[in-house]
Image (cartoon, rainbow, N blue to C red):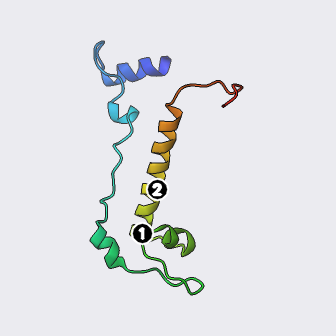
Amino acid sequence: MELVRRHVAEHGIGEREVIFPADLVVPPPQRTKPRLREEQLRALGNCEPVNGRVYAHGTLGGYVTAKCRCEGCRQWVRDYGRERMRVRRTAEAGPARRRWEKIT
């Protein structure tokens, strides 16, 4: 408390004024990356062949199997993760059950 009192006194903060500015408390807004359109994804072409197989950029095979980390493949992963979380939240929002309750 003594530190806060000293801070208020040093900065001449009045009784009805904000002690700490909002930018110290609230995190900055998240920046969203611009999405690649379908034409842009197709223009990326294919990833490097893996064991004779070729995978397109922006697909499961491109990210997981070919281990590609281009913008198209990372966009696929972001979309996949968001969809999984959306499905999980929807399922969790269903009727609440107790852990020990038998599911029929």
- Where does the image place residue 24, in percent across and percent down from the top left? 38, 34
Above or below: residue 37 compared with residue 47: above
For the view shown, which residue lies furthest in the bottom direction? 52
Front-lying residue, 90 or 103: 103
User: What residue did someone put label 1 on?
Assistant: 58
**Residue 21 located left or right of residue 81:** left
Relative to 70, is 32 above or below? above
Kind of residue at badge 2? Tyr
Q: Quadrant of the C terminus?
A: top right
Q: Secondary structure at mark 2?
A: helix
Q: Residue furthest top?
A: 15
Question: Toward which corner of the image does residue 43 lie, by quadrant?
Answer: bottom left
SS at mark 1 in the image: loop
Looking at the image, is mark 2 or mark 1 earlier in the sequence? Answer: 1
Q: Disc 2 designates what residue?
A: 80
Q: Residue at x 40, y 32 (%)?
A: 25
Q: In this view of the protein, which residue sits in the foreground, 91 or 66? A: 91
Residue at the image position 47 percent from the left and 60 percent from the top: 77
Q: Residues within 10 Å of mark 1 (few under 14, many from 20)?
A: many
- Locate residue 71, reporting x and y percent: 39, 68
Which numbered circle lies on residue 70?
none
Q: Quadrant of residue 39?
A: bottom left
